[in-house]
Amino acid sequence: MSSSLPVLVGQRPAGENLTPKEIVRELDKYIIGQKQAKKAVAIALRNRIRRMKLSPEMAEEVAPKNIIMIGPTGVGKTEIARRLSRLAHSPFLKVEASKFTEVGYVGRDVESMIRDLVEIAVNLVKQEHRRRVRSRAEQRAEERLLDMLLPTKRVPDASLDAVEQHAATREKLRAKLRDGSLDEREVEVEVTERSFPSFEIFTSSGVEEMGVNLREMMPGMFGGRSKRRKMKIVDALGYIAAEEEDRLLDMDAINREARRRTEEAGIIFIDELDKVAGREAGGRGPDVSREGVQRDILPIVEGTTVTTKYGVVRTDHILFLAAGAFHVSKPSDLVPELQGRFPIRVELDSLTKGDFERILTEPRNALIKQYKALMATEDVELEFNDEAVAEIAAFAESVNDRTENIGARRLHTIMEKLLEEVSFEGPDMAGKKVSVDREYVHRMLADIIEDEDLSRYIL
């Protein structure tokens, strides 16, 4: 997972009381169909808002209603969870249940879900705090840089005229600094080269994170060394501003807020849950491993405490969204205790030709919009008529039916193959317009679509 700060869907401020209908409308901007799944997650998010308004005693008793989303790959399960977290401005982590079956990693991996989620929360909160102190940090960086350019001379009997002249020169330099006149000039900046080794502990259950901060225990050993380096003023200003931001950050407050946000607003998406949906069969074999994984996940979902390098985190009120195709197994194959912790089940629909047409054109991040924007950077205008869109959708449905059904992901491979020549020749086509119609789509894709072996390997 990316640690960058999520962008709120629709640019709504964090914490706003969105109603379930408003949440669904926001999800509709990015995900086609799947009304039942959207409705379920919207209620789950709204219940979090409701819980915040309860008395502490009652709020402690209200557990999140975890959800299992059932459906084939590529129909929107992951995207629903991801967009929900961005809408809620929540720390979000996606994990794959099937990864927990690896020998030696079961115990470690399950708890590492929480450690990874806290890490995401820390980065998210840190970025928020950075934005708050950025203006002050830039002011302080500007003053430090002016001190480098025009050092203040310590003259005991300096005249008032000399002081005023120095101040006036400093303001002239400030104006030049702000208008970019000094960007290419070089200055020497003291930089700290940090080299802190990473440590892992190998135990019988796998590789564990070391729960101590060696930098705090031995500050002199890993503090890094300082050296002077020449850099352009425009680069120096950014480097010094970042240093000042670090100095202004209250890491204790950030860590406290990150733990609180993890506990109260964290969302973990467990994909491929169907891959571990198995019961014990004769005392040995893969089913034992699957049931063991379920029982390792169970305490995390039920509510436990996990020690992280940022402090102890409770998992009682983290929202867990799980997903799986459940072609071979079914949710009732999960151990009863885990079933009880996922009381909401929603089934997502397979995508039709009409869904593919809407996915290509309607969402804010629609594929056709993306390709138009990409080619516009080369001054190439891409145009798709309705017949072309319908033909692309029909091809996607056909290939999914005849080979592996990978849902909307099929559109990515088809669009890439369709526009391969345009993408390759783009730099030499500046100023031109490319019209994609039904004939163009058929010419580029028909041979591959008709040859099942080719479509299996290429599309």
Image (cartoon, rainbow, N blue to C red):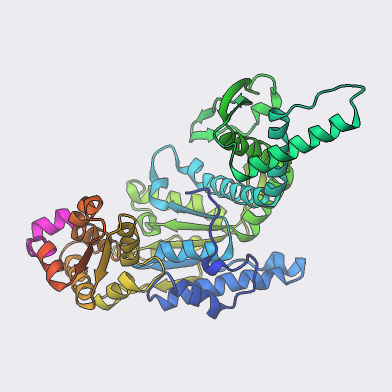
In this rendering, is residue 233 above or below 44? above
Residue 241, compared with residue 277, is above or below; it is above
Q: Main secondary structure of the magenta part?
A: helix
- What residue is rendered at 60% in x and 39% in y? 238
Q: Outermost residue, front direction?
A: 161
Say if 163 sits above or below 178 in the image. Answer: above
Whether residue 339 can be seen here: no
Q: Where in the figure is residue 444, as x and y percent of width and height?
A: 13, 62
Nearest the viewer among 38 and 89 is 89
User: Residue 436 or 104: which is nearer the viewer?
Assistant: 436
Image quarter hosting the C terminus: bottom left
In the drawing, does residue 203 fall left or right of residue 376? right
Residue 452 lies in magenta, yes or no?
yes
Residue 237 versus residue 133 in the image, above or below: above
Magenta residues (range): 445-459
Q: Quadrant of residue 174?
A: top right
* Residue 144 seen from this side: yes
Residue 423 at x, y = what percent?
A: 23, 54
Residue drawn at x 43%, y 77% is 36
Tell me residue 235's x, y (percent): 56, 35
In the rendered structure, the answer to whether residue 431 lies left or right of residue 125 reads left
Is residue 138 highlighted in magenta? Answer: no
* Residue 434, quarter of picture: bottom left
User: From this viewpoint, which residue is outermost toward the right?
Assistant: 157
Q: 47 or 86: which is nearer to us? A: 86
Q: Is residue 433 left or right of residue 153?
A: left
Pick the front one: 259 or 344: 259
Report the residue at 28% width, 72% height from top: 356
Image coordinates of residue 43 in percent, x first then y, are 55, 75
